Image (spheres, rainbow, N blue to C red):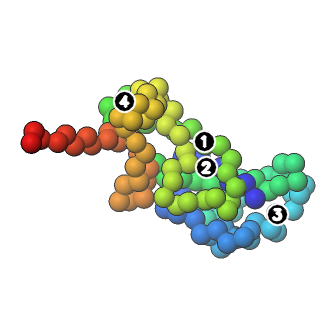
């Protein structure tokens, strides 16, 4: 199973056990089926499911909020597909889309950060300068 994340309301992290994501058994979604969301899939943070090249692809929500860096507004885009077995709840899978934020991240001046509320943001890296000895 492959996973992709979009910025949106969802759980802070996912419990993935084989084909079960936060209590939803995705193995019941057979090739050729059409995904119709429900209150249960919404609560589990599942946006969609589809079969591609014989493999189930599931799109999940990852909570985000406005960047903590000075950009005009927050904006996120989806990340790439990952194997479900590689899922790590301490990793930000959505990607900052604002050019200034991307430059700051790529240069090491900013980073993805999961706040106490579980939402991902982009924040400036705190540089600690050593005093003179």
Q: Residue 5, image x and y in percent?
A: 61, 49
In whole angstroms, how far apart are the C-alphas of marks 2 and 3? Answer: 19 Å
Report helix, strand or loop for mark 2. Answer: strand
Badge 3 marks a residue whose secondary structure is: loop
CB under 8 Å between discs 1 and 2: yes
Q: What element does badge 1 sit on? A: loop
Q: Residue at x 56, y 48 (%)?
A: 93
Q: Which mark is residue 123?
A: none
Vertical order, 133 against 36 (above or below): above
| Mark sitting earlier along the chain (2/4) | 2
Alpha-carbon distance for marks 4 and 3?
A: 41 Å
Compared to residue 98, the image places residue 48 above or below, namely below
Q: Are marks 4 and 3 in contact (CB under 8 Å)?
A: no
Numbered tag placed on residue 5 in the rendering:
2
Give the residue drawn at x 49%, y 62%: 12
The span from disc 1 to disc 2 (Cα, nearest Å) is: 6 Å
Q: Quadrant of residue 94?
A: top right
**Foreground residue among 52 and 90:** 90
Residues under numbered marks 2 and 4 in contact, where contact means CB atoms less than 8 Å apart: no
User: Residue 78, which numbered label?
Assistant: 1
Measuring 17% from the left and 42% from the top, which residue is drawn there?
Answer: 130
Q: Secondary structure at mark 4?
A: loop
The residue sitting at the front extreme is 133
Q: Which mark is residue 29?
A: 3
Mark 3: few/some/many CA within 10 Å (<14, 14-19, 20+): some
Q: Which is more foreground, mark 1 or mark 3?
A: 1
Looking at the image, tell me whether mark 4 or mark 1 is earlier in sequence order.
4
Q: Compared with residue 39, is residue 81 higher up or lower down, i.e. above or below?
A: above
Q: Position of residue 75 (x, y in %)?
A: 48, 36
The residue identified by callout 4 is: 71
The quarter of the rendered structure image containing the N terminus is bottom right
């Amino acid at each position: 199973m492959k996973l992709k994340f979009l910025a949106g309301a969802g759980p802070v992290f996912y419990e993935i056990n084989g084909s079960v994501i936060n209590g939803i058994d995705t193995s019941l979604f057979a090739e050729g089926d059409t995904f119709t969301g429900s209150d249960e899939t919404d609560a589990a943070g599942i946006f969609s499911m589809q079969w591609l090249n014989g493999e189930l692809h599931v799109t999940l929500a990852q909570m985000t909020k406005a960047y903590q860096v000075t950009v005009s507004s927050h904006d996120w885009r989806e990340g790439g597909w990952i194997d479900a077995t590689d899922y790590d709840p301490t990793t930000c899978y959505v990607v900052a889309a604002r050019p200034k934020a991307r430059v700051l991240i790529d240069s090491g001046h900013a980073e993805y950060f999961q706040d106490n509320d579980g939402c991902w943001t982009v924040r400036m890296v705190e540089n600690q300068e050593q005093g003179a000895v």
